[in-house]
Amino acid sequence: MTKQYSFPREKMKILLLEGIHQACVERFAQAGYQAELVKPAMSEQELMDVISSVHVLGIRSKTQVTPRVLERAKHLLAVGCFCIGTDQVALEEAAGRGVPVFNAPFSNTRSVAELTIAEIVMLARRAAHKSQLLHQGVWEKSADGCCEVRNKTIGIIGYGHIGPQVGLLAEAFGMRVYFYDIVGKLPLGNAAPVSTMKELLEVSDFVTVHVPDTAETRNLIAAPEIELMKRGAFLLNLSRGRVVDLEAVSVALRSGKLAGAAVDVFPEEPKSNDEVFQCPLTGLNNVILTPHIGGSTLEAQRNIGIEVATTMLKYIETGSTTGSVNFPQVELPLVRDSHRILNIHRNVPGVLSSINSIIASMGANIRAQYLETRADVGYLIIDVDSDISEAVKNSIDDLDTSIKTRLLF
């Protein structure tokens, strides 16, 4: 079915930052759009300076889409986070301004899981530390402090997308797998849930964290939690930097409470490769530090580029918000010989009644309609007769409750 879109494709500005994979650009090009690809991240001020003309924004983990940025984003239709996390975007502010945010919750799960298991093995064998010594000309061949991971217990905190993959790989190594999540989850393989994080910390030889950055998860692992762990246990964080208190980890490593740690994410990370990296764990024995590369594989970045571009294209071209993290989930099949209106509004009583009254007063026929709400925002897709669609759109847009109304085609 061929559609004539109300906003010409060639005039839509798509800005992709932080070296997003070329596959994303190609996906947009296949759909008839031109995307501008910029390698570095942008500071808040840099983004504020350009955002007023941007319709679609793509970022990774460094660029911050703050309320100040969103205030200037007068034409912004959608934001794509080409990663798992979305804490770099002011999600509720974006929703309140009618901007859905999309991410890639599945595309890099395998990459993060593989690095997690690799670091567990390297920590158990003290291989990273011995490698550092060899680079310094020191030959230290010894089995002291080294062990196999087989028959050891791994405790996974957070059993969302990555946690189950870590569990399956760990099980293949012969490890016992326990997990803790605040939401009940179906175990994969022979993984066993525990009822409290305390229980998981007490029984695990290796503890790995895979949770988002929220108010509840900040400093989730600090001195009291480390004290619950076995003496000589290992701690890994490949989730978000503020989840683990690195000062507490440093103290535990120096005292021997922890035998090793692996960290891929940090509370403060350099904005570019030219900045100096600082961390309380640098220089400590049997500590693996990686520069936020858990999902940085060619396979993952390509998959992420395609996944996020595809979900954003569905929103741009059909109004579908399936996969959005901050918006009502709405998807309506296309209806032949009709025009589609998208209305984002404040979630208050009587909005649908007002909109339907407008349509009825104009003598228009509703061909299809779908309304969903989330928190303070409502999202409505309406397919109406094509001969009156623009007048209907304008009248709906004039309602006090409307945040943003778009005649899609």
Image: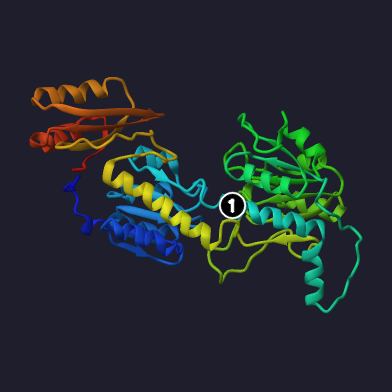
Q: Position of residue 266 (x, y in %)?
A: 63, 55
Indicate how the structure is coloured in the image. rainbow
Q: Position of residue 227 (x, y in %)?
A: 82, 41
Which quadrant does the C terminus fall into? Answer: top left
Q: Position of residue 328 (x, y in %)?
A: 38, 33
**Left or right position of 314 against 142:** left
Residue visible at 29% across and 47% down in the picture: 316
| Residue 19 in the image: above or below residue 86 | below
Q: Amino acid at mark 1?
A: Arg
Quadrant in the rendering for residue 400: top left
Q: Position of residue 232 (x, y in %)?
A: 86, 49
Q: For numbered disc 1, what is the local secondary structure?
A: helix
**Left or right position of 239 against 31:** right
User: Which residue, given by chain and number where applicable, does mark 1 sit on?
Assistant: 110
- Rate crowding at label 1 as few (under 14), some (14 to 19) or many (20 or more) other CA atoms within 10 Å: many
**Left or right position of 109 against 140:** left
Residue visible at 72% across and 57% down in the picture: 119
Which quadrant does the N terminus fall into? Answer: top left
Task: Report if residue 49 is visible in the image.
Answer: no
Task: Report if residue 400 is visible in the image.
Answer: yes
- Seen from the viewer's position, the closer of residues 96 and 338 is 338
**Left or right position of 396 against 280:** left
| Residue 112 in the image: above or below residue 187 | below
Farthest residue to the bottom: give it: 137
Q: How many marks?
A: 1
| Residue 343 in the image: above or below residue 41 | above
Quadrant in the rendering for residue 379: top left
| Residue 39 in the image: above or below residue 373 | below
